[in-house]
Amino acid sequence: MKKEMVRVLAVVSIVASMSLMAVGCAKQTASSDKGMASTAGSGEESLAAKGASDNAGGGNFLEGRTSAPMVPVYFDFDKSNIRADQKDRVKKNAEFLKGDAKVNIRIEGNCDERGTAEYNMALGERRATSAKKALAKLGVADSRMETISFGSEKPLATGNDEAAWAQNRRDDFVIK
Amino acid sequence: MPPTTAMKPSRTALSRRLPRFILACFCLLCLLCLATVSQARVYLDITSPELRKVSVAVPYFVEKTKPSETMASGRQMAGLMARGLTFHGFINVINPSLYGGRSDADWAGLGADFAVIGQFDTDFTGVSIELKLIDVHQGQMIFGRRYRGPWAKHDQIVLKFCDDIIEQLTGERGVSLTRIAFISNRSGHKEVYLGDALGTNIIQVTRHGYLTVSPRFSPDGNFLAYTSYHHGNPDLYVTDLRILKTTRPISRRRGLNMAPAWAPDGRSMAVTLSKDGNPDLYLMDNRGEILERLTHGEGVNVSPSWSPDGKKLAFVSDRVGNHPQLFIMDMQTKAVQRLTMSGSENTTPAWSPKGDWIAYTARNGSTHNIFLIKPTGGTPIQLTQFWGDYESPSWSPDGRQLVFSRKRQGRSQLCVMFKNGSGLRVLYEGEPGSQTSPQWSPRMDVQ
């Protein structure tokens, strides 16, 4: 009985604090998560909890969503290895990063829209990781780079042909 | 409030439901045994290919106190019952306008094999619905039952009856009281939604306003796991569908935390994490603690699906030749065997509830289709074959139907189809936006 009461109180106070949070700090940014435990950690959230803002569509089309002066790296269908013709682009990004030690980046892996969502999500992660490894080999500190995969969820080019698909099989290098 | 206390209610709720789930499984087992012992009770072998559709009359439900009047609610309930029965594919409901929806029509003259007679009674405490299933040829009632509940639940009560009737006719419970979880972009962002299997009552579950993927039901249907990017990383969350207010982060490890598949006993889940540098499968408990690492960097490893006995796990890997194929892991020995041998891209395995098939998405040329393959291998069977890309199958709990997405001209809708490739129907026809990644819930009770 007492346990039930405690449980009810807990739920009530969570709901109350949730609604307070929703009013008080609707605009939480992604950076506020940095201190968080890497595992579960932070207790319950509202099903309407927001965090990072979705800036899809930003960026120069020709250079993906990559922050200048870095350039995106492109991949073959279903592949995550750095193509021979893309190695110079990785080098260019490495030179820039080595020239400014204050810059930290997020490498975003993307896939074309063909294929199923979960496989693409994992493939995008492999693409981001493979660029991270290549940059590390060229002397960029591991700690300055993080990876994220958007799979085929944030296509930049929307056409249904190889030209559009090739644009979307891409790693972006975004300054944090 | 320390986070550990905040997390407690749903955690205990899950563990509290488990014994009940096991008990339910036991009862189901007993029922199945009964069904085999008393074969006489089962009327139809719906697995028989030469089965003709059974004709069923469902006259308008009658309000007990006003038997001579046709009530709108009585028509609505009969209509819902008819939709529920028809959904199972082997029943043809006779159009009630042919006999004015009267519950004393000449059933044999109308060509009915069975008649479903419904009566209801409302008062300030709710509604009581009484139902009889009549075998027209034998001229006798073969099933009668009464349920009570609040008026707001009358639709669910009607569907519970419907699933009872399917059980009486086939020996296995119907699936009209089930739901489909899916991803829709109708709000401008991908979020999790729920709709019922009959194609109505869509509700939005998440409102994170960013990107949400991979919904999965717990084996008892009360919890839903999904991956959301709203904190900037694809994190794994679980929400209690009976409350639908809060959600609990289960795994927020750096990188992917996605596509969880609950083990049939509900105690653990297989999930793809990339925290160690590669998308690998891990076994995790319901609090997000890692129990075991299942794959070790051999290509991509995603989309796990358990065999119903929990002894094997089907998943997708591109460990051979850079193309995704289906593999099966023996959970005891952890030995992995390749399942699909043909085609350059086979993904999203879904193990059938009876264990006899694995449905999946295969790319041939530039299009995607739904295929079936035996868990022991062999020649795959192609189910879908018309215009469009067909992806991400999920089984109905009776293993007779599949839900999947169909993409045409960039827009994706959900479809259901029978296991033999017949009866393709679009669910949520008028729903705006694209619907993807459907998951069929287990059977539920009136909630």
Image (cartoon, helix red, strand yellow):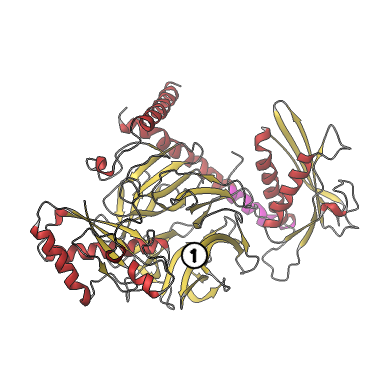
Query: Is B107 left or right of A72, judged from the image as shown?
Result: right
Q: Position of residue B9 (x, y in %)?
A: 41, 33
Answer whether residue B98 is magenta in the image: no
Count the marks: 1
Q: Nearer the viewer, residue B325 or B142?
A: B325
| Residue B296 visible in image | no
The reply to whether residue B230 is visible in this rendering is: yes
Few, some or many residues within 10 Å of mark 1 (<14, 14–19, 20+): few
- Quarter of the rendering containing residue A77: bottom left
> Tag 1, which chain?
B
| Dominant SS in magenta | helix
Position of residue B221 in the picture relative to residue B416 (left or right): left
Residue B31, magenta (yes or no): yes
**The residue stretch that appears in magenta:** B28-40
Which x, y percent locates residue B219?
49, 49
Quadrant housing residue B170 = bottom right
Tell me what residue is drawn at x 17 percent, y 53 percent.
A104
Q: In the image shown, does B247 or B183 lie closer to the viewer?
A: B183
Kindly identify the amino acid type of the residue bearing the numbered disc 1: Gly
| Front one among B264 and B86 | B86
Above or below for A80 versus B184: below
Instruction: Please state the horizontal and vertical placement of residue A34, each as a whole percent of the image.
Output: 23, 43
Disc 1 target residue: B410
